[in-house]
Amino acid sequence: MLACIIMARTGFVYHADYLEHDMGPGHPESPQRLRAIIARLEETGLLPGLIRIAPQLATDDWVTQIHTNSYVRALRTRAPHQGYVSLDPDTSMSPGSLNAAYLAAGGALTAVDAIMDKRVDNAFCAVRPPGHHAEADHAMGFCLINNVAVAARYFQKRYGLERIAIVDWDVHHGNGTQHAFYKDPSVFFFSTHQYPYYPGTGAVDERGEGKGEGFTLNVPLPAGMGDKEYLEIFNHLLRPSLKAYKPDAIIISAGFDAHRDDPLAGMNLTDEGYKALTRVVKEIAGEHAQGRVLSCLEGGYNLAALAASVEGHLRVLQEA
């Protein structure tokens, strides 16, 4: 008699238009990142077991929950018909960038719909451009629209969830996400990141302000930290913090650039380390958030390490 393998229903957001965002030859945040992920998922046979979620374009009604009207207008005005337009020293737009950015944010919102409609248990959004550096009024650090911040507000205002936790394990501090909710106790922001390092924010004494004080938890780390140190932090800081907070959903800013092979930082996480962190977050969500986990791709610039880490991340999300 064959045993029945029970797996979680994991949604997967992807669209070929994400490849049309191009910041120029040699830029680390390149379309090759998603091509590497898709190739790995096809080669390992994982892709057919994921529930495909077709992203829809985000509307300005939702984007402006986080970003200013003037910034949104500027994005539309400055979007080029040919060539590149520089938004900051690291961030530019090509003719396909505006559509990709709205489709990335919209992909996160479509994944929220799938989770809340119970079509999936959790979801991973293989999107670009990434989002966690994007501030309310300007692009920054490869990011145009803050995908996870917009998704947090969407969880709250579209579906009435009260408390959202955002777990950001990208090696760079998610300054845009922190600032979006710095005075807001309805979103708990947790970040592990190399420090001091780009973008310069994320000190341990940045804990929130006003009613939001205590709902930002930064864990700045020196270079060289690996699986053991990260797992201790997640078990001994994140678990009790979210046990007390009791989020209704958890969003992961899933940057894979703390990997030991990543060229843009100096951490020592491995594929197995990312699997362990994913398992901790998933367990917390199972205890407090009805299993609701929305994961959105942020950084990760060694193509092989990125693809392997995403594969492991997805395999844990699929675990029953």
Image (cartoon, rainbow, N blue to C red):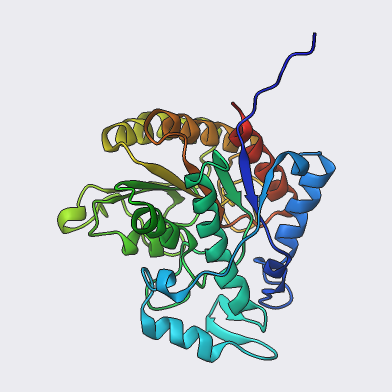
Residue 254 visible? no
| Corner quadrant of residue 46 | top right
Residue 230: x and y, percent? 48, 36
Position of residue 319 relative to residue 134, above or below, is: above
Who's the residue at 44% across and 81% down the image?
72
Side of 161 relative to 48 (left or right): left
- Which quadrant is home to the N terminus? top right
Who's the residue at 27% across and 59% down the image?
182
- Which quadrant is home to the C terminus? top right
Q: Which one is in front, 217 or 262?
A: 217
Position of residue 72 relative to residue 283, above or below, is: below
Q: Which one is in front, 174 or 156?
A: 156
Who's the residue at 47% across and 61% down the image?
132
Residue 55: x and y, percent? 61, 61
Label tally: 0
Side of 133 relative to 90 (left or right): left
